[in-house]
Image: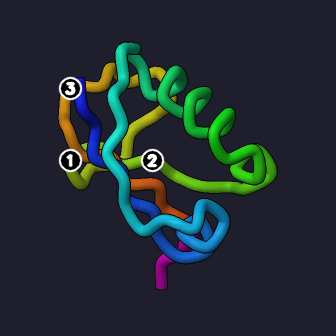
Amino acid sequence: MNINIKYFGLLAEVTQQEAETINFEGKLVSELLDVLQSKYPALKNKDFKVAQNQELVSINTEITGQEIAILPPFSGG
């Protein structure tokens, strides 16, 4: 399945990508993160959240959508 991944803030700088499409055969967010951290080793040292179809998800969430956002830490106010 093709997954559209968007990177924001510092994470776009780390990956030198704002967006990309990858072919992903896994099922869980954690498996996708393993693929991305292999491709971009600097992600291993970064704190970030993952959103699927504009909703924050945990690493144990099954990937059901085609849009994943990798978000830097943010604070509410």
Residue 38 image offset from top left, x and y in percent: 68, 33
Query: Quick one: label 2, few (<14), some, or many (20+) residues within 10 Å?
Result: some
Residue 26 image offset from top left, x and y in percent: 40, 14
Res 72 quadrant in image: bottom right
66 left or right of 75 in image? left
Q: Residue at label 2? A: 50
Q: Residue at label 3? A: 64
Query: Quick one: label 3, few (<14), some, or many (20+) residues within 10 Å?
Result: some
Which one is in front, 11 or 55?
11
Question: Can you say whether 36 is above or below 74 in the image?
Answer: above
Q: Residue at label 1? A: 53
Q: Main secondary structure of the magenta part?
A: loop
Query: In the image, which residues are magenta?
Result: 73-77
Q: Could you tell me how far apart the alpha carbons at marks 1 and 3 are, in whole angstroms?
A: 9 Å
Residue found 36% across the figure and 37% down from its top: 22
Q: Earlier in the sequence, mark 1 or mark 3?
A: 1
Residue found 30% across the figure and 25% down from its top: 63
28 left or right of 64 in image? right
Residue flagged by tag 1: what amino acid is it?
A: Asn
Q: What is the image's colouring?
A: rainbow
Residue flagged by tag 3: what amino acid is it?
A: Thr
Residue found 69% across the figure and 55% down from its top: 47
Question: Can you say whether 52 is above or below 54 in the image?
Answer: above
Residue flagged by tag 2: what amino acid is it?
A: Val
**Local secondary structure at mark 1:** loop
Q: Could you tell me how far apart the alpha carbons at marks 2 and 1 are, in whole angstroms?
A: 10 Å
Q: Are marks 2 and 3 in contact (CB under 8 Å)?
A: no
**Local secondary structure at mark 3:** loop
Residue 69 image offset from top left, x and y in percent: 37, 54
Q: Earlier in the sequence, mark 2 or mark 3?
A: 2
Q: Residue furthest top?
A: 26
